Image: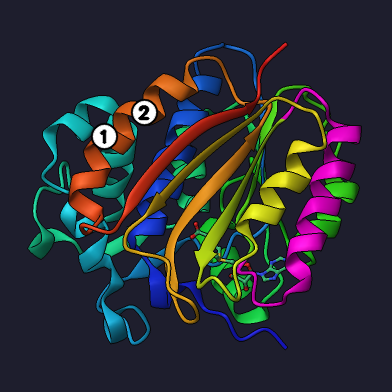
Amino acid sequence: MLSYRHAFHAGNHADVLKHLTLCLLLSRLNEKEKPYFYLDTHAACGIYALNGRFAAMHQEYLGGIARVLDCKDLYDLVPEYFSVLAKANGQQQVLNTSALRCYPGSPYFAATLTRPFDKLAFVELHSREFEDLSHNFRRDERISLHCRDGFEALGALLPPPIKRGLVFMDPSYELKSDYTAALKAVKAGLTRFNTGIFALWYPVLGRLRDHSKNLTQDLKRLRAPLLQVELRATAQREEHGMCGSGLLILNYPYQLYEKLEQCLNLLYPRLCDENGSARLRIINPQD
Ligand code: SAM
């Protein structure tokens, strides 16, 4: 049985990196008039109340979104991120932590930033999360909602009828098998939809439990264009805790590297302590 609830972590440093990257990918796709397909394989509920029972427990957003809210340069670089944040909080502009009530999840970013003619599919396996997800997005006719395994959904929902798109994969890695399932799913997804962008989020855990290096090597072997962005908020310890996170992006779009480089320059001093680090690299170049 799944017990992971993302609300405990809403708006933390990993969410900031993840959702800024998502905004950059969507805005890149929006540059062309042609419609595209967005698949969110691990959607969770879509929006989190920061004063809710779960998020308020550890207030992880204080080490994440609360530290970048007033960053004007980041606002200029990725205005979409801040406009979605403001919308989720029922405001024109969210500029300080006291005005921050909610933090949007990947489905909320995608539903807000896509256009009327794009198509979206949100997948979530946890029944309670799916109930909330359905409640939040049931009125949007562009979106299909699926309570099922997100890794398997790649086989079922790809290839999309539209040949452009983004598959956004944000597993909880609650099960160790999620790493192999993610690799298998990306492999199958690329076979079915080789023009699609695939973005896979991963945590950087304590050395004894960390799988990020192996996952990166496995994805490298798929030979598709591959870019990696990673931010470690603090030093990696032997055992416990998530010190950082990253995304592996297959078929990454042109100029994503430059945008992410600017983002990391702004995030690093705000989200990392003296033992933290940022990394951006092209692992397999574009043809
Ligand atoms: N993408 C969300 C966001 O940005 O707000 C957060 C997703 S959270 C990290 C991971 C979610 O995946 C959880 O809600 C969990 O219930 C769900 N999940 C876990 N295993 C799954 C699976 N095999 N298929 C689909 N969803 C799964």
Q: Identify the residue at image location x=47%, y=81%.
A: 240
Q: Which residue is mark 1?
A: 265
Q: Count residues near mark 1 (Cα–Cα under 10 Å), then give few for <14, some for 14-19, many for 20+.
A: few
Q: Position of residue 91 (x, y in %)?
A: 18, 48
Q: Secondary structure at mark 1?
A: helix
Q: Is residue 98 left or right of residue 206?
A: left
Q: Is residue 128 above or below residue 258?
A: below
Q: Is residue 140 above or below residue 47?
A: above
Give the colouring mode of the picture.
rainbow
- Check whether the beta carbons of the residues at disc 2 and disc 1 lie within 8 A of each other: yes
Write the start and end of the magenta stretch as one range.
172-196
Q: Which residue is mark 2?
A: 261
Q: Count residues near mark 2 (Cα–Cα under 10 Å), then give few for <14, some for 14-19, many for 20+.
A: some
Q: Is residue 185 above or below residue 199?
A: below
Q: CA distance from mark 2 to mark 1?
A: 6 Å
Q: Position of residue 157 (x, y in %)?
A: 84, 45
